[in-house]
Amino acid sequence: MIDVPPPASPGAAQKEFRPGTSWMTAAASLAFLVLGVRLYQLQILRGDDYKERADGNFVKELRVPADRGFILDTGHRILVDSRPSYDVTLRPYFCGKQCDDTLSRLSSLLSLSEDEMGRAQERLRAARGLERFRPFTVKVDIAREELDIIEANRVPGALSGVDVIPAPHRNYRYGSWGGHLFGYMNEIGADELKKANEEIERRGDGETLPYQLGDYLGRRGLERRWESRLRGIDGVRRVVVDAKGNAKGGDLEDLIPEVQRFEPSRPGQNLVLSIDWRLQEFAEKFFPGTAGSVLAMDAKTGFLLALVDRPAPDPNKLSGRISRAEMLAIHNDPLRPELFRAIQEHYHPGSTFKVVTSIAALEEGALKPGGTVSCPGYYALGRHRWRCDKETGHGTVDLEHALGASCNVFYYALGERLGTDRIAKWARLLGLGRPTGFDIGGEITGVMPDEAWHDKHVAGGYQRGMALNVAIGQGDVNVTPMQQLVLYGALASGIVWKPQVVERIEDPSGQTVQQFAPVEAGRLPVKKETRDQVMKGLLAAVNQPFGTGYWSRIKDIQIDGKLLVMAGKTGTAQGVKLGARRLKAAQVTYSERDHAWFAAFAPADDPEIVVLVLNEHSGFGSSNAAPTASAVVRHYFELKRADALERAGVPFGPPPPPALVPAERAVPPAPAAPRTLEGPASAPAAAKGEKRGA
């Protein structure tokens, strides 16, 4: 039998919990009493005082711009950094109805240009709603004297809404040198602002702050390509201000919790380039061209060692407030300094293209090993004659002699045998007619014409004689300097490299964030026997007395006890048709002169460096391009030796000046031609042994 306890009386459970609820009720009552007393004190006793203070004060957020990441060379030498400076901003809300007067006052104090004043007035008119709380930049990078003037005129009631913000500005330490590679920065536009912020939102990067009007972003070159990595994260400084935007100090600062008063900015990441600035600086000084490119590449990795591209505007100027008149002068310069010639302009390659025709002929069976052609000084096809560079002819020549002496007749014969389709096929396999993949932006494809291309683009369509012009790198063949560098890099290493210039990305402390490996775009698609025969011709061009580059050979540098041997090819590309009479460069206008080319690599038996020189409208490749390439190769090995001695702790002096550098070239040389396209001008003297078309 189970005992069942009697039911509890009503309210028994409630009585058991009543002591606990009593103390909780008492505590709550006390809290409400304290709150009521405090509210009475704030609203009744001191309400008027706090209302006055609240009505007259705001918390204003001031951006603390972040330092942009450095651009460094392979030896960690600073090429691009940021320097301290100040910008003047205006926040429309705080100047109210006096904004126009405030702008006029600033114009007087800072001597604003017409462009600067116009931009500021446009921004002021566009500020509506919440935009009135956002500052816009009136003048960037003010001088120290202007900063003192602003501070001296900060009297009550004047310059309301005006702030002077510490703002790091980009500093390109070497001016226009490397200007196309680095790019530049300028102010973001309204349309770009929306797109840029949408991109930040799409990436889902919670740390990256959106752009604001007045912000700067990268334009062209590395600055644009790596904008998201170079850009840092801005900080914030919060201050208490009155209704006019004037900062209030004292105990009012306590209205902002201490941890919220200042959030420091964080610098952007650094780019470490493969460029050795010592080699770059040497090439910049030695290259005599008014316009053109000097490119050097590591033959074993495809990373660039130097990139000279001339002319180029000074990115320091472009990154500041440049006037419309100054921009117009750059746009109208006949030498087109905004053009990144290495990847954005193409030229007839001239005789440097003959390696392609040689490979095509050997691989297609149009030329047998040891085959010869007789050169009487011209080549006849139908009723037309194509002339050779040597009017008296080269006699009977094989591939080695034809490539070394740059015999056009030999290649006219190969062109007729091959036709344009088979030449174009091998040119494309070697990387021509398409972008190299150099990851900067704006790279063009060049033109590698075949019969179909001629039928589509040339009046009358394809004709047999067009193959003769294509075979010597004329006609409609067009290449960029970067494409030629990659082509000769493939001949040197057997690999078609994707050219690169950024080795790694580092954080502000110098720790590697991302490392870039060499990238193969393909392999040299030729038989060993074919490459060996072409190499004989490239060696002859530089090292045999009949070679067009003989006077630029390297004669006195040894590596591991062996003389350094360089292989290469000159080229003289005709830009305009001048008729049958042969003229020297000094006898024609700048724009009518030939383009001078030279491509080389060394050591020939185990290449380390590939160099490409294009000296635009300068004349012969043998005298106006080959000396620069030879000097760059020489200096590369001198630097390599000096670095090895330094690592070994052996004292050494600076490398001796190259033997090819005349005494008068100890300082940066004057341009080879004036910056004009009108009228004849003087040209450099021809080197001994100079050959037309070489």
Image (cartoon, rainbow, N blue to C red):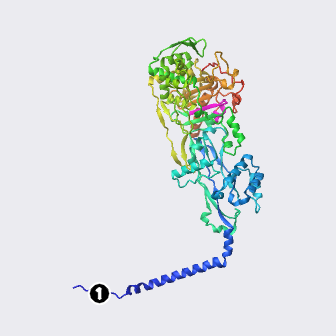
Residue at horizontal 64 percent and vertical 51 percent from the top: 213
- Whether residue 140 is visible: no
Left or right for 538, reference 581? left
Quick check: 550 above or below 442?
A: above
Does the magenta-highlighted stretch encompass residue 62? Answer: no
The image quadrant where one finds the C terminus is top right
Pinpoint residue 527: horizontal percent, then vertical percent: 44, 25
How many discs appear?
Answer: 1
Residue type highlighted by circle 1 = Pro
Does the magenta-highlighted stretch encompass residue 284? Answer: yes
**Of residues 48 and 146, the one drawn nearer to the viewer in this rendering:** 48
Crowd rating for badge 1 (residues with CA inside 10 Å; few <14, some 14–19, many 20+): few
Left or right for 293, reference 18? right
The image quadrant where one finds the N terminus is bottom left
Pinpoint residue 207: horizontal percent, then vertical percent: 55, 55
Write down the residue under mark 1. 5
Q: Quadrant of residue 49?
A: bottom right
Q: Secondary structure at mark 1?
A: loop
Quick check: 692 above or below 524?
A: above
Range of residues picked out in magenta: 281-296
Pinpoint residue 597: horizontal percent, then vertical percent: 60, 26
Quick check: 59 above or below 67?
A: below
**Of residues 353 and 215, the one drawn nearer to the viewer in this rendering:** 215
- Whether residue 470 is visible: yes
Residue at horizontal 60 percent and vertical 80 percent from the top: 37
Q: Quadrant of residue 174?
A: top right
Quick check: 567 above or below 9?
A: above
Pinpoint residue 553: horizontal percent, then vertical percent: 59, 24
**Of residues 207 and 72, the one drawn nearer to the viewer in this rendering:** 207
